[in-house]
Amino acid sequence: MKNEQNGILVTSHQLEVIKSMESFVDRHLSSLLKPVEESWQPTDFLPDLTRDDWREQVGDFRTRTKDLTDEVLVVLVGDMITEEALPTYQTWLNRLQGLGDPTGSSEVPWARWSRGWTAEENRHGDLLNKYLYLSGRVDMRSIETTIHHLINNGFDPQTGDDPYLGFVYTSFQERATKISHRNVGVLAKQSGEDRLHKICGMIAGDEARHEKAYKLFMSRVFEIDPSGAVVAFAKMMKAKITMPAVLMDNEKDTNLYTKFSRVAQKAGVYTAHDYADIIEDLVAEWKVAGLGGLTDAAAKGQEYLCGLAERYQRLAERVKFSGAEKFSWIYNREIALAPVAAVPE
């Protein structure tokens, strides 16, 4: 039996592998998702408007944000918008064959993971949205319009409904998101905004756990079906990892994601070097170089993957920027671009 979507075939063998992993996922859920009662919530980091001194709290909050640069604000807004498109991501995750939630409240391990992951991720956009709103530093209506467009435009990571491709994509993307949030936090601290530094660190910590989960799921696929796993990994990398917010735009700016990406690279928040580093990390994590007994197609994929990070590092060395970009998010102020500089730890 084969299911096909967008030219991507999902075989009955793949579905058997995913089904066989249910007990494995069930055993690991408690370490991959935090209990709700032990989890942070957005209000833990925001002014308490029920207190008599709420005005003073808000004033202090706004004072702390005044030294954030436009560059930091833009990458923070872009990261927040990415998080706010969560409905699209859960819809995609539930489309992957064998990973769906057939009733909406199913106790199947895959469904419990999907809902738990979504619940944890939901806090990220909520907190960053409220943070930016209370800062008074950005045009929230422009930002809200971008979020509206992004969810309306959708999201296609080129995985079809293939669960193997889905695990490769999420393993990569969760690490990329972790890097971006972490580095925004570093820049916030450099601007003297320790609260935002802590917020970004907490979000990055969630992303790190989610990265661990998806890498673990794919590691299990590599154990059960190494040839199928290598072929999927190579296919996903040849398709290239499409960032979740690539379709962001607004009425007057359909090139918005490219502009945001250029600023993020210029700031060292997420760069072409990071892309190459993630490939290298995944190749090592899944021990691709040492796999034997592969099919011919998988052996070709193995060779391709083992040299891919170096190829991207060479390409990253050629990345240069010039000119400037304007963003409606910050009232059309202009950000000058320059060569990428790494964010220090």
Image: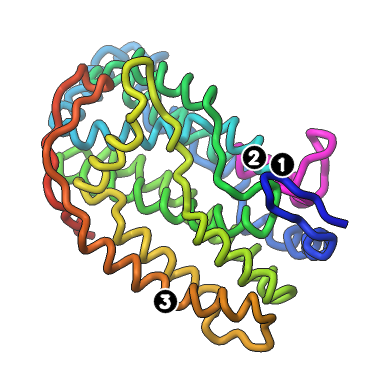
Q: Which residue is mark 2?
A: 92
SS assignment at label 3: loop
Q: Which residue is mark 3?
A: 307
Q: For the magenta stretch, what is the residue range?
A: 95-119
Q: Are marks 2 and 1 in contact (CB under 8 Å)?
A: yes
Residue 142 in the image: x percent, y percent? 34, 16
Q: Nearer the viewer, mark 2 or mark 3?
A: 3
Residue 170 in the image: x percent, y percent? 55, 53
The answer to whether residue 57 of the structure is visible from this angle is no
Name the amino acid type tagged 3. Answer: Gly
Q: Which residue is mark 1?
A: 95
Height in image: 35 above or below 24?
above
Residue 113 in the image: x percent, y percent? 69, 48
Name the amino acid type tagged 2. Answer: Trp
Residue 273 in the image: x percent, y percent? 29, 61
Lower sequence index among marks 1 and 3: 1
Height in image: 328 above or below 71?
above
Q: Mark number for residue 221?
A: none
Is 39 or 276 nearer to us in this picture? Answer: 276
Q: Quick one: quadrant of the C terminus?
A: bottom left
Q: Nearer the viewer, mark 1 or mark 3?
A: 3
Mark 3 crowd level (few <14, some 14–19, many ≥20, 10 Å Cα): some
